[in-house]
Amino acid sequence: MHVRKNDFVQVMTGDNSGKKGKILQILPDKKRVVIEGVNYVQKHIRKSEKNPQGGRMQMEAPISWSNVLVVCQNKSCEKSGKGVRTRRKFLDSGDKIRVCYKCGSEIVISE
């Protein structure tokens, strides 16, 4: 999978194309991600003791993870601030990291 939780991504296709946000949740069995501030839907809430009025709540809905790309944060990259493809690089210690396809800089997850 090319994205992880807390990655800063850009939506590439669909109604929300061009929007950017942080990944809040990954649903691997459905191959979907929930992105902060993207793909809002109205959820209807039933009346209860906790919510005596009932009504509608706005929340983010999941979108397919094939429609998002990780944003490169490196300032020297020509695609800085835009979605880029990633590749894996193996270190001498045997660990593997994600790097930007264009500039080769490491993709770091910001908490």
Image (tube, rainbow, N blue to C red):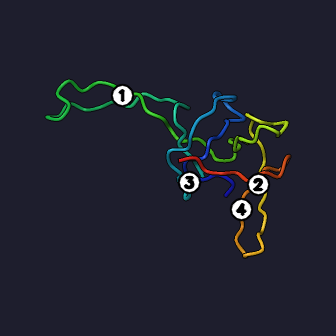
Q: Nearer the viewer, mark 4 or mark 3?
A: 4
Going 68% across and 42% down the picture, which residue do you hit?
A: 68
User: Residue 53: x percent and y percent?
Assistant: 20, 24
Residue 40: mark? none
User: Residue 109: x percent and y percent?
Assistant: 61, 50
* Tag 2 residue: 99
Against 18, is 68 above or below? below
Characterize the local packing of mark 3: few (<14), some (14-19) or many (20 or more) Cα atoms within 10 angstroms. Answer: few
Q: Nearer the viewer, mark 1 or mark 4?
A: 4
Q: Nearer the viewer, mark 1 or mark 3?
A: 1
Q: Is residue 32 left or right of residue 93?
A: left
* Tag 3 residue: 30
* Tag 4 residue: 97
Q: Are marks 2 and 4 in contact (CB under 8 Å)?
A: yes
Against 23, is 81 above or below? above
Q: Are marks 3 and 2 in contact (CB under 8 Å)?
A: no
Going 85% across and 46% down the picture, which residue do you hit?
A: 102
Going 75% across and 42% down the picture, which residue do you hit?
A: 74
Residue at far bottom of view: 93
Residue at far left of view: 49
Q: Is residue 110 left or right of residue 2?
A: left
| Residue at mark 1 to residue at mark 4: CA–CA distance | 39 Å
Q: Earlier in the sequence, mark 3 or mark 2?
A: 3
